[in-house]
Image (spheres, rainbow, N blue to C red):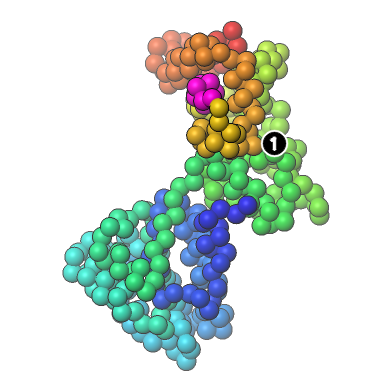
């Protein structure tokens, strides 16, 4: 299911565009997607050369923005002014210039669509920013939580009419994290290489993204959940032999996050799965993995695991590590987790 940010972008239509948009936040993927959608639909292609202006904050002043906005379109009903990286406008912090923007926002030209796109979050409590809500819209696209990323991948694949397996979702999620643009790029690459009706599975991820379907932190975590020593040691031997592709520090972080949530689950009783997933900050689909681990790892063992992960993290960064190799660190850590 598409999240709220995707719905906002998908609902944009030329006939309902507002004269003002103040776009900011911490998630550049949605900021860029929103701006690109407006550029696509606001002005017909044959008018773009006369009535579409794409500006960059570092190249203009606040006065330039006002002058462009107060122009009338050339032989058309609308003109589009997009200011990308608006936070880099050199004189934007000047109160007099902010007042100019505030005055324009309170009385904008209906024939102008002005989009200010900021590459970082802004303070919406400021009076001049609030003014953009009078005749326009303020949009704050926030960074996606890690547990929301699997749903983003599923939604993106659905929009692109692609089928994807749960394992492929988790491989992408754990390999890329919550870098939505990187995820989008990888799925675009997969789409180009897929045969008609072919689904994205672990094999296609391994072939085109370069993530081993058998030797990755997802499979390591799965082997630990199952307390499968043979498989676990096969994976960490591979990691130890290929530390350039499988450095221990990011994998420690992933395991620390997992076992911390298993420990949290041990203290949560009498809740529905939906509530548990929300309280733990995990995707509901993967809750079964946490429940299985909680059934095999008692609280005292989990506390020891957390302690072992913290020690391994310090050693991986050279603190009290001596001459130990990453392969040996992997071996010691996994022994402490299993036993």
Placement of 72 over or under 6, stated as above or below: below
Q: Is residue 121 rendered magenta in the image? A: no
User: How packed is label 1: few (under 14 Cα within 10 Å), some, or many (20 or more)?
Assistant: some
The image shows residue 328, relative to residue 165, as above or below, that is: above
Q: Is residue 313 left or right of residue 201?
A: left
> What residue is drawn where x is 28% and y is 57%?
125
The image shows residue 196 at horizontal and vertical percentages of 81, 54
- The image quadrant that residue 207 belongs to is top right
Residue shown at the point (69%, 36%) measured from the top left: 167
- The residue sitting at the front extreme is 270
Residue wearing tag 1 = 167
Figure quadrant of residue 258 = top right
Q: Is residue 115 visible?
A: yes
Q: Position of residue 159 (x, y in %)?
A: 66, 57
Residue 42 screen position, x and y as percent = 51, 76
| Observer-nearest of 271 and 247 | 271
From the image, which quarter does the C terminus lie in?
A: top right
| Residue closest to the eye, 101 or 191 | 101
The reply, left or right, for residue 41 in relation to residue 133 is: right
Q: Position of residue 103 (x, y in %)?
A: 25, 75
Left or right of residue 60, residue 284 in this image: right
Q: In percent of the image, x 44 and y 55: which residue is there?
A: 141
What's the magenta region?
Answer: 261-269
Residue appearing at x 46%, y 58% in the figure: 31
Residue 174 visible in rendering:
no
**24, above or below 231, in the image:** below
Label 1 secondary element = helix
Considering the whole magenta stretch, tell me its main secondary structure: helix
The residue at the far bottom in this view is 75
């Amino acid at each position: 299911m598409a999240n709220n940010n995707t719905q906002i972008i998908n609902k944009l239509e030329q006939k309902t565009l507002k004269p003002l948009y103040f776009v900011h936040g911490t998630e550049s993927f949605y900021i860029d997607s929103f701006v690109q959608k407006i550029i696509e639909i606001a002005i017909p292609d044959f008018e773009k050369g006369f009535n579409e202006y794409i500006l960059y904050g570092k190249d203009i002043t606040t006065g330039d923005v006002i002058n462009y906005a107060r122009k009338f379109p050339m032989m058309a009903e609308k003109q589009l002014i997009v200011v990308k990286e608006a936070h880099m406008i050199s004189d934007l912090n000047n109160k007099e210039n902010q007042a100019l923007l505030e005055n324009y926002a309170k009385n904008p030209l209906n024939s102008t669509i002005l989009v200010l796109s900021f590459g970082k979050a802004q303070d919406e409590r400021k009076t001049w920013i609030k003014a953009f809500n009078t005749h326009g819209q303020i949009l704050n696209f926030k960074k996606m939580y890690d547990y929301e990323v699997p749903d983003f991948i599923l939604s993106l694949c659905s929009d692109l009419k692609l089928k994807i397996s749960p394992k492929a979702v988790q491989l992408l999620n754990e390999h890329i994290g919550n870098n939505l643009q990187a995820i989008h790029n990888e799925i675009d690459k997969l789409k180009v290489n897929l045969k008609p009706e072919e689904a994205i599975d672990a094999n296609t991820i391994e072939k085109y993204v370069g993530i081993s379907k058998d030797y990755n932190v997802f499979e390591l975590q799965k082997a630990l959940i199952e307390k499968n020593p043979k498989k676990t040691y096969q994976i960490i031997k591979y990691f130890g032999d290929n530390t350039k592709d499988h450095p221990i520090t990011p994998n420690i972080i992933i395991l620390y996050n997992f076992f911390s949530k298993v420990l949290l689950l041990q203290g949560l009783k009498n809740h529905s799965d939906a509530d548990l997933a929300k309280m733990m900050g995990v995707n509901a689909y993967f809750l079964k993995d946490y429940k299985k681990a909680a059934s095999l790892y008692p609280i005292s063992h989990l506390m020891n695991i957390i302690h072992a992960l913290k020690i391994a993290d310090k050693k991986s960064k050279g603190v009290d590590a001596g001459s130990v190799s990453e392969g040996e660190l992997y071996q010691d850590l996994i022994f402490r987790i299993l036993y």
